[in-house]
Image (spheres, grey):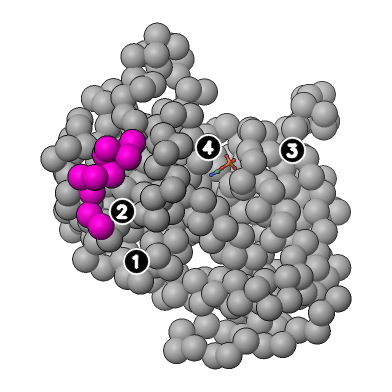
Amino acid sequence: MATYVPPARTENPYLPLGDHRNAPFYGKDILSVRQFSREDLDYIFGVAKEMHAMVERVGTFDLLKGKILANLFYEPSTRTSSSFTSAMERLGGSVIPINEVRYSSVSKGESLPDTVRTLECYADVIVLRHPEVGASALAAKYARKPIINAGDGVGEHPTQALLDLFTILSELKRVNGLTVTMLGDLKYGRTVHSLARLLSLYEVRINYVSPEILRMPEEVKKELSEKGIPQAEYETLDEVLPETDVLYVTRVQKERFSDLNEYESVKHAYVITPETMTRAKDEMIVMHPLPRVGEISMEVDEDPRAAYFRQMEYGLYVRMALLAMVLGKA
Ligand code: ASP
Ligand code: CP
């Protein structure tokens, strides 16, 4: 195992890696982006930058040696589950993977509170993805160990929003002053619910582009207007594309529709192609939480403005930072 060498300090007000049991996130749950302040974000992104530097320098190191993460996924996942696994293992810890609850005692009828009370006997932190809004908050009520929300139905996906914001900062070097356009399924897409709320801590303009039936929930829009964020809604991208700095594309969430005919009517509402990109700024980025199912054509991947693959990598560093923080090591 490589020896830990602290990276060079920067002007960010974050603590160095090490033992920080009095640090603000030690033992805390991560349930909603509403729990974060601007100072928290600076701190998290500072630690994430350190993680990036460490991964480049040594790949894997021992900060969380002996710690165990339980990955409890009641819904499918590729990125979130594997990046949390990678994050834990790069920090020297290990993982209990429950990636398909069908094979666990959940299929015998075990409740969520009992399942988390079981896993916390064996693990130090639990990452939970569940189809119901508020499931992580319920789990946190019963668990003594930190719960990290990895997506609760159509509610939130806070760690995704943190990595999305970290992507914007890393790629465009600022958030204030940007125009962010969210496109696609804004009704059921939990990533945009979290990202819009997190962006409201900055001075941004937000455009929502969606079919009429998939508009951003009133509750989210209201929260943002109370913070004075300019928001506008459209059904086509044309009008807002030329002013957009961040185009955040989402998948129509088929699994959330009760009426599949309704899904069929909107599933191909928007497709980003190289032709679309000719009308976008030279300096802008296209993001997507992924998986994509046709909303961005593969020919766009070669465009340097396509940031969605880099976005996944930023997620590793943010999740390493979060694990180190809740376990008192950053
Ligand atoms: N992977 C993201 C989520 O779980 C986005 C998506 O599935 O479309 O919310
Ligand atoms: N972005 C995201 O949450 O991807 P997965 O659903 O594959 O975890």
Q: Circle 4 sits on which residue? A: 291
| Residue 276 falls inside the magenta stretch | yes
Closer to the chain start, of discs 1 and 4, is 1
Closer to the chain start, of discs 3 and 4, is 3
**What whole-number distance in Å separates the C-alpha atoms at marks 3 and 4?**
17 Å
**Element marked by disc 4:** loop
Q: Circle 2 sits on which residue? A: 246
Amino acid type, residue under disc 2 in the picture = Val
Q: Residues within 10 Å of mark 3 (few under 14, many from 20)?
A: many
Residue 274: x, y in percent? 32, 40
Q: Is residue 236 visible?
A: yes
**What whole-number distance in Å separates the C-alpha atoms at marks 2 and 1?**
9 Å
Q: Which quadrant of the figure has residue 3?
A: bottom right
Amino acid type, residue under disc 1 in the picture = Leu
Q: Is mark 4 within 8 Å of ligand 2?
A: yes
Q: Count the marks: how many?
A: 4
Q: Is mark 3 within 8 Å of ligand 2?
A: no
Amino acid type, residue under disc 3 in the picture = Asn
**Element marked by disc 3:** loop
Question: What's the magenta region?
Answer: 273-282
As displayed, is residue 191 above or below residue 215? below
Amino acid type, residue under disc 4 in the picture = Pro
Q: Circle 1 sits on which residue? A: 172
C-beta proximity under 8 Å, tags 1 and 4: no
**What whole-number distance in Å separates the C-alpha atoms at marks 4 and 2?**
18 Å
Closer to the chain start, of discs 2 and 3, is 3
As displayed, is residue 24 above or below residue 245? below
Q: Residues within 10 Å of mark 2 (few under 14, many from 20)?
A: many
Q: Residues within 10 Å of mark 1 (few under 14, many from 20)?
A: some
Residue 314: x, y in percent? 54, 61
Closer to the chain start, of discs 1 and 3, is 3
